[in-house]
Amino acid sequence: MTGTATRTRVRAWAHRQAETYRNGEERPLDGYVKLMSVYATGTVGALLVAKKLGRDVGRITPWDAVQLSVATHRLSRTIAKDAVTSPLRAPFTVYQGVSAPSELHEEVRSHNGVQHSVGELLTCPMCLAQWVATGFTMGLVFAPAATRTAMSIFTAVAGADFLQHVYVKLQQATE
């Protein structure tokens, strides 16, 4: 079998799988594949550069892991839900209102291709977390002091958010 025939069969198989998966719904699988490719290429590329530069890619302390978790949570929510970051999401989403205190609810603007996939990514804090954590982790490899400072800021903001919610609950309890 020639290379062209093999590619044709693989494409036909992939299209059948996609149609079966979609089950009559519009799902932008091609956009997801493109985003996964960007993520994988960026991550592998950064790791190869780190190796070439002799950077230690496996040195994350337990404190780094804790701070990385909290900072990733906070930055992911900031990107996905904060009013101030809505210009980042605007090309991919439509404003629908408020979803929680200090958080916006937006819907994906387009239902095809990369625009839809990016819209889903940018409005989902849990989806963004992997990208944010990867960014922070690569930051620890290439610029550890600056990254720890940034993680400290977002960890402090997460702590402050928690305390704001506790304060409101305590106020409500005393009324």
Image: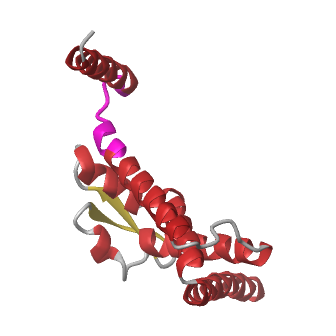
Please tell me whether residue 5 belongs to the stretch shown in magenta.
no
Q: Residue at x 54, y 83 (%)?
A: 143
In depth, the one of 9 and 105 nearer the eye is: 9
- Above or below residue 142? Residue 89 is above
Q: Position of residue 81 (x, y in %)?
A: 44, 71
Residue 168 sits in quarter: bottom right
In depth, the one of 160 and 129 nearer the eye is: 129
Residue 139 sits in quarter: bottom right
Q: Position of residue 29 (x, y in %)?
A: 33, 37
In depth, the one of 158 and 52 nearer the eye is: 52
Please tell me whether residue 28 belongs to the stretch shown in magenta.
yes
Q: Is residue 62 left or right of residue 21?
A: right
Q: Residue at x 27, y 9 (%)?
A: 1
Q: Residue at x 25, y 19 (%)?
A: 3
Q: Is residue 121 left or right of residue 162?
A: left
Q: How many marks?
A: 0
Q: Position of residue 62 (x, y in %)?
A: 79, 72
Q: Residue at x 49, y 56 (%)?
A: 127
Q: Is residue 74 visible?
A: no
Q: Is residue 59 visible?
A: yes
In depth, the one of 129 and 40 nearer the eye is: 40
- Above or below residue 60? Residue 129 is above
Residue numbers of the magenta segment: 22-33
Q: Is residue 90 left or right of residue 134?
A: left
